[in-house]
Image (cartoon, helix red, strand yellow):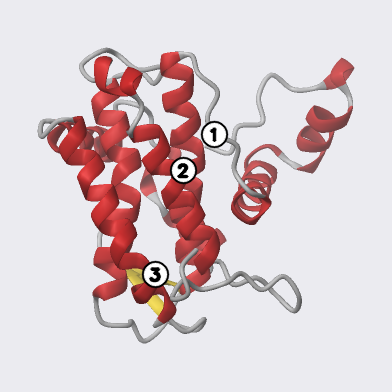
Amino acid sequence: MTETEPTVHTSGGHDLRGAFLAAVDHVAAIVARDDVAAAWGEPSALPEWSVGGLVAHLASQPVIAVELLRADPWPDSITIDEHYRRSAWVQAGVDGDVNVSIRAGGDAQAVAGRDAVLAGVAEAREALPELLAAQPAERAVLIPWAGWALRRDDFLTGRMMEVVVHGEDVAASLGFDSPPLPDEVLAPVLSLLTRLAVRRHGQGALVSALSRAERAPRTISAF
């Protein structure tokens, strides 16, 4: 990181601004791959998603972060767990209106091509260090399509979850191993996914899946 980039504090709580920069670098590494560009118009591993649409959705995460962090602070916020409890896409099927709209957005962004999508990531990465450095921990970031706000680090955790999950989706689509992520990115994302999986499937199902192969459920997917 450069001198202007925020650091992550590991004692007395976590400041996720530095982690988010690492997540954006992860996005750039995936989008820049030659096999991603070559497969742009092919179907992805996700139903109804093209590779280009999926990668554009992945690449939109830092761009969205810049846009929303530049907006005016919101007066109040909800927790990240409440955010996912309220979000319509979590329970909607692949053909639900909200998920059709999300795919359409990715497809629309993908029309510009891989190089343009990658340039958007690079532009966001350049803007983020200074922008993140100006965000206090209590900053409430409005998510306009949802109608509510999250505190700074909850907002960044949600964007990092999108990066981690969709990065693996792209890797599965093309048959490569995604670049390893640092613990500062994985830890908050895995904590979030664990809580969401427990809420959806119950404590016993999650513990069994992680510790007892003989009684592991078929799935413990958080979504």
Disc 3 + disc 1, Cβ < 8 Å: no
Disc 1 residue type (three-letter)? Pro
- Of mark 3 and mark 2, the one earlier in the sequence is 2
Disc 3 + disc 2, Cβ < 8 Å: no
Q: Residue at x 88, y 16 (%)?
A: 214
Q: Element at badge 2?
A: helix
217 with respect to 100 (left or right): right
Disc 2 residue type (three-letter)? His
Question: Can you identify the residue that label 3 sits on?
Answer: 129
Picture disc at residue 179 = 1
In this view of the protein, which residue sits in the foreground, 190 or 116?
116
Give coordinates of residue 90: x percent, y percent. Answer: 44, 42
In this view of the protein, which residue sits in the foreground, 56 or 78?
56
Q: Residues within 10 Å of mark 1 (few under 14, many from 20)?
A: few
Distance between the alpha carbons at the discs numbered 1 and 2? 7 Å
Q: Count numbered badges in the picture.
A: 3
Q: Residue at x 19, y 35 (%)?
A: 115
Disc 1 + disc 2, Cβ < 8 Å: yes
Give coordinates of residue 196: x percent, y percent. Answer: 61, 47
Q: Residue at x 68, y 46 (%)?
A: 194
In this view of the protein, which residue sits in the foreground, 206 or 181?
181
Picture disc at residue 26 = 2
